[in-house]
Amino acid sequence: MCQQMAEGTRWTKCMHFQRHMVVAIMDCNSKRCSRSLQHPKGCRDQRCIQSFGAEIQKDIDSVDEYCFACRAAQERARRNANTAS
């Protein structure tokens, strides 16, 4: 499978990655991967891989905090705990 190389922010408290942009595609050179330059043009074989493999994550900066999604989930959990009491 071909892979996307992405640059982004690493949130160090939860270790989540926030992608800013895809900067490159790593070609797997497989004729069975529709994303590869080696894949035959006009191929209609349903067995060919249609998606990218695991993203390669390149940290361009890091923040010593929880990501936005984790902070929102923590806030929801705190509010739910307060209303249940």
Image (cartoon, rainbow, N blue to C red):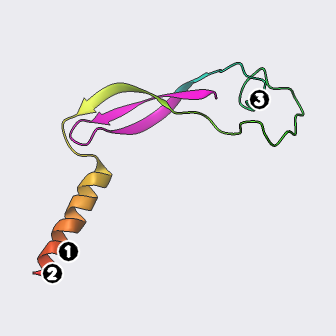
Magenta region, main secondary structure: strand
Q: Are marks 2 and 1 in contact (CB under 8 Å)?
A: yes
Q: Residues within 10 Å of mark 2 (few under 14, many from 20)?
A: few
Q: Are marks 1 and 3 in contact (CB under 8 Å)?
A: no
Any mark on residue 84, and which?
2
What SS does tag 3 mark?
A: loop
Q: Are marks 2 and 3 in contact (CB under 8 Å)?
A: no
Q: Which residue is mark 1?
A: 80
Indicate the amino acid at tag 1: Asn
Percent of width and height locating residue 22: 53, 30
Residue plotted at (15% across, 73% down): 81
What SS does tag 1 mark?
A: helix
Q: Which residues are magenta?
A: 1-22
Percent of width and height locating residue 45: 85, 39
Indicate the amino acid at tag 2: Ala
Indicate the amino acid at tag 3: Arg
